[in-house]
C-alpha cells in the first residue's frame, strides 16, 4: 500500500463536496505502510471566519514542520479537501506504533480550537468521512482516534477539542460494517448485543454501544465514562437513581481534572512559545482556583454517596444543590483556563513570532529602567506578556490587580493587548512603550507619588485648584506618554500623533471624567519633554504641524481656564513627572533613570537604514527598533511590507 490514491474515491462515498488539491496523489513524505487508524485533529488557526484558511499550511507545512500535514482538510462548511496520498506529518510521537504517521490517516478540521462549539454541518461531515474511511480500510470505530488520545506523552496534544467518545458514537450511528465483538469484557454476564446491521434505522442504536472495545477500555480503571444501564440487566429499573447520582459526581470530577496545569511544551518548541515563568504563574493561579472547587467536588461526591445509600428527599436535594455549586465553580475555573489557553495558543500561530518580538521590546524597557535606578531592585518577574486582539486601541492589564475575566483573581503578570492593525504597521507601535509605562508606574511604586507631584508643581505654577485637579486626574495617561517618550524618543511622538490626530471635534474634545488628557494638549506635553531632552528643533516642527491641524482651539469643549493656563501647566507637569526625584527610584528623577539623547536618535536612524537593506542592525536596544522602522518608513528607504518583515525578523534573531 504505497500511496493511498483511492482517498478521493473513498471520500466521495459520502454526500460531501470533495475537492482534490492538485498533486495530491503524489504528495507525501514517502509511502504509507498500511492503514490501521484514522487520527482526528483541529487546525487551531486563529482566523475564525474563512472556510478553510489552513489549507496552504496543510499542503506546505510550517517553518518548524514540513508538509503535508494531513491527508484531508475538512472545512467549516463540511467540504473535504484531499491533500495528500503518502505519509503526512500529523501524529508526531504516539503511544502505540499503529497510530503513527506510517499507519494512520490524518484529518485536519478547520477550527480555532478555542471555540467550544463546532458547526453542526462540519461535525456531521467529520463523522461521515471517518465512517467511510473506517469501512473502506476495514477498521473498527475504535480505530477512529483523536490526536489528544494518541499523542505521547499523554496530554501533549489537546486536539480535537470535542469529546471523542461522543464522536465515535456518532460515527457508529452512521452504520457501516458491524462492530467487532468485544475483545475482553469486565462485565460478568455478556449483554445482548444486537448488531447494528440487524437494527437498520433503529432509534436504539446506542443499546449495543457498550460492547465496543473502546468503551470497555474507558470503563476500566478508576476514571471512566458515566456508567450506562444495560438492557437486559435484571435490576436496571431500580439502578437508575444510584447510577445517575454517581454519574453526576463523576462528570464534575472529570471536568475538574481536565482543567489541569499547562505545560510549556504543549505550546510548541518554537522560541515564541510562552516562557516557563509565564506558564508556572498561570498554573499557580489555576491551583488557587481549584482549591474551593476540589472541596465542592468532594462535597458533591459525599452527598451523592449518602443519597445512594439512603435516597431520602433531603439527601437527594442536597446532592443536586452540591452538583449545581460544583458545576458553577468548575465553569468559572474553565473561563480562566480558556483565557490563558487562548493567550498561550496564539504563540503557536503565524503571529507567534510577532508577539515574541513585542515581548522583547517590553522586556528591554523593564531592563533599562531597573538597571539605572538609584536603588538595587531586581526586575519583576514574569515580565509583560503580549497578545493580539482586533480592535482600535492597545490596552494593558497590570500585575496584581483583580481582573473580571479572571473571576476577580489577581493578574499574575502584566498583559499588553495589541491590536492587529498595529502589528501590521510596526512603526505605529510606540503604543507598546506607552502601555509598558503604565505597568512601570506601578512596579516603581509611583501610583501615589506622581499624582501628588503633579498637584504640587501645577498649583505652584499659579494654576487654579479646579484646573490643577484635572491635570492630577490625568496623571496615569500623562505618565504613559512621558515615560514612553523617554524610552522611544521622537518616534514615540509621531506614533502618538497617528492615534490622537482625529477630527477637530474629537481631538479638541474634553471629557469631564476622562483619564486621557484632551488629545490637543497631549501633543504639547510630549513636545515640551522632547524639547527638554535636547531636540528643540524637532519639537518645534511637531508643534507647528499640530497647530496647523488644529488652528482654533477656542472652539473646544475644554474649560476656558484649562486652555488659558495650559502654557503654564504643561512645563510644570513635565517637571513634576520627569525631573522630580522620587524616593522609590532611589532619590533619582525619571529623566536620570531613562537615557535618551541625540546620540540615541542617531543610533535609531542608522538602525533604520540597515533595516531597510535587510542587514543586521547590530546590538541596538529592542525598544529603539520601533523608531528605527519608523525612520526608515518616513525616509522611504524601502517598501512598507519589506520593512515590516525585516523588523520582525531582526527582533526574532536576537
Ligand atoms: Zn494609556
Image (cartoon, helix red, strand yellow):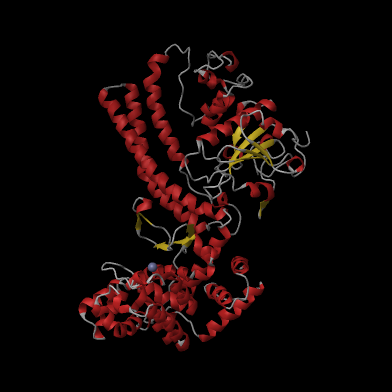
Looking at the image, residue 605 lies above or below residue 336 = below
Tell me what residue is drawn at x 75 percent, y 37 percent: 32
- Circle count: 0
* Residue 534 at x, y percent in the picture: 46, 88
> Of residues 178 and 81, which is closer to you in this image?
81
Looking at the image, residue 49 lies above or below residue 443 = above
State the image quarter where residue 402 is shown. Answer: bottom left
State the image quarter where residue 449 is shown. Answer: bottom left
* Residue 357 at x, y percent in the picture: 55, 65
Looking at the image, residue 631 lies above or below residue 292 = below
The C terminus appears in which quarter of the rendering?
bottom right
Tell me what residue is drawn at x 39 percent, y 30 percent: 248
The N terminus appears in which quarter of the rendering?
top right
* Residue 190 at x, y percent in the picture: 55, 14
Q: Residue furthest right?
A: 2
State the image quarter where residue 502 is shown. Answer: bottom left
Q: Residue furthest left?
A: 465
Mark yes or no: residue 457 visible: no
> Of residues 146 and 318, which is closer to you in this image?
146
Instruction: State ligand 1's quadrant.
Output: bottom left
Tell me what residue is drawn at x 65 percent, y 46 percent: 58
484 left or right, relative to 34: left
* Residue 193 at x, y percent in the picture: 56, 15
Mark yes or no: residue 133 visible: yes
Looking at the image, residue 577 lies above or below residue 305 = below
Amino acid at each position: 500500500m504505497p500511496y493511498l490514491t483511492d482517498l478521493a474515491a473513498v471520500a466521495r462515498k459520502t454526500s460531501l463536496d470533495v475537492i482534490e488539491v492538485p498533486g495530491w496523489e503524489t504528495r507525501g513524505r514517502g509511502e504509507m505502510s498500511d492503514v490501521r487508524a484514522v487520527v482526528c485533529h483541529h487546525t487551531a488557526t486563529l482566523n475564525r471566519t474563512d472556510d478553510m484558511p489552513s489549507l496552504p499550511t496543510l499542503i506546505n507545512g510550517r517553518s518548524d514542520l514540513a508538509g503535508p500535514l494531513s491527508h484531508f482538510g475538512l472545512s467549516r462548511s463540511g467540504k473535504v479537501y484531499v491533500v495528500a496520498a503518502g505519509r503526512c506529518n500529523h501524529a508526531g510521537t504516539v503511544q502505540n506504533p499503529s497510530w503513527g504517521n506510517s499507519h494512520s490517516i490524518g484529518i485536519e478540521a478547520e477550527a480555532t480550537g478555542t471555540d467550544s462549539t463546532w458547526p453542526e454541518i462540519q461535525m456531521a461531515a467529520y463523522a461521515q468521512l471517518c465512517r467511510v474511511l473506517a469501512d473502506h480500510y476495514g477498521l473498527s470505530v475504535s480505530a477512529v482516534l483523536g490526536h489528544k488520545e494518541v499523542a505521547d506523552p499523554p496530554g501533549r496534544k489537546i486536539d480535537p477539542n470535542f469529546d471523542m467518545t461522543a464522536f465515535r458514537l456518532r460515527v457508529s450511528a452512521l452504520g457501516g460494517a458491524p462492530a467487532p465483538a468485544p475483545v475482553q469484557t469486565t462485565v460478568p454476564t455478556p449483554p445482548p448485543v444486537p448488531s447494528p446491521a440487524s437494527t437498520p434505522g433503529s432509534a436504539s442504536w446506542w443499546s449495543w454501544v457498550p460492547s465496543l472495545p473502546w468503551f470497555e477500555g474507558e470503563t476500566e480503571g478508576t476514571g471512566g465514562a458515566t456508567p450506562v444501564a444495560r438492557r437486559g440487566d435484571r435490576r436496571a429499573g431500580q439502578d437508575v437513581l444510584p447510577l445517575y447520582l454517581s454519574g453526576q459526581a463523576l462528570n464534575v470530577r472529570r471536568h475538574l481534572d481536565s482543567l489541569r496545569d499547562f505545560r510549556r511544551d504543549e505550546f510548541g518548541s518554537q522560541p515564541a512559545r510562552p516562557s516557563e515563568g509565564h506558564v508556572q504563574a498561570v498554573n499557580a493561579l489555576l491551583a488557587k482556583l481549584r482549591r474551593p472547587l476540589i472541596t465542592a467536588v468532594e462535597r458533591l461526591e459525599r452527598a451523592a454517596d449518602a443519597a445512594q445509600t439512603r435516597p431520602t428527599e433531603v439527601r437527594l436535594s442536597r446532592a443536586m444543590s452540591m452538583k449545581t455549586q460544583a458545576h458553577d465553580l468548575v465553569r468559572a475555573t474553565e473561563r480562566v483556563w480558556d483565557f490563558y489557553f487562548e493567550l498561550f495558543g496564539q504563540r503557536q500561530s503565524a503571529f507567534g513570532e510577532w508577539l515574541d518580538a513585542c515581548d522583547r521590546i517590553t522586556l528591554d524597557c523593564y531592563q533599562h529602567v531597573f538597571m539605572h535606578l538609584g536603588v538595587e531592585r531586581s526586575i519583576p518577574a514574569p515580565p509583560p506578556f503580549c497578545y493580539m486582539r482586533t480592535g482600535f486601541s492597545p490596552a494593558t492589564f497590570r500585575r496584581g490587580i483583580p481582573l473580571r475575566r479572571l473571576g476577580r483573581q489577581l493578574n499574575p503578570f502584566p498583559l499588553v493587548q495589541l491590536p492587529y492593525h498595529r502589528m501590521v504597521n510596526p512603526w505605529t507601535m510606540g503604543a507598546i512603550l506607552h502601555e509598558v509605562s503604565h505597568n512601570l508606574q506601578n512596579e516603581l511604586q509611583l501610583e501615589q507619588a506622581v499624582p501628588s507631584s503633579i498637584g504640587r508643581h501645577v498649583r505652584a505654577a499659579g494654576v487654579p485648584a479646579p484646573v490643577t485637579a484635572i491635570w492630577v486626574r490625568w496623571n496615569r495617561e500623562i505618565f504613559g506618554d512621558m515615560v514612553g517618550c523617554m524610552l522611544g524618543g521622537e518616534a514615540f511622538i509621531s506614533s502618538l500623533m497617528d492615534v490622537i490626530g482625529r477630527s477637530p471635534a474629537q481631538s479638541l474634545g474634553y471629557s469631564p471624567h476622562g483619564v486621557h488628557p484632551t488629545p490637543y494638549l497631549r501633543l504639547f506635553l510630549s513636545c515640551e519633554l522632547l524639547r527638554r531632552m535636547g531636540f528643540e528643533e524637532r519639537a518645534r516642527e511637531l508643534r507647528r504641524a499640530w497647530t496647523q491641524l488644529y488652528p482654533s482651539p477656542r472652539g473646544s469643549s475644554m474649560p476656558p481656564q484649562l486652555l488659558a493656563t495650559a502654557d503654564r501647566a504643561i512645563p510644570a507637569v513635565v517637571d513634576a513627572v520627569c525631573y522630580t526625584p522620587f524616593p522609590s527610584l532611589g532619590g533619582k528623577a525619571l529623566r536620570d533613570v531613562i537615557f535618551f539623547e541625540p546620540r540615541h536618535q542617531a543610533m535609531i536612524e542608522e538602525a533604520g537604514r540597515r533595516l531597510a537593506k535587510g542587514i543586521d542592525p547590530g546590538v541596538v536596544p529592542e525598544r529603539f527598533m520601533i523608531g528605527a522602522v519608523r525612520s526608515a518608513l518616513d525616509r522611504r528607504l524601502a517598501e512598507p511590507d519589506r520593512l515590516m518583515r525585516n523588523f520582525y525578523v531582526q527582533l526574532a534573531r536576537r
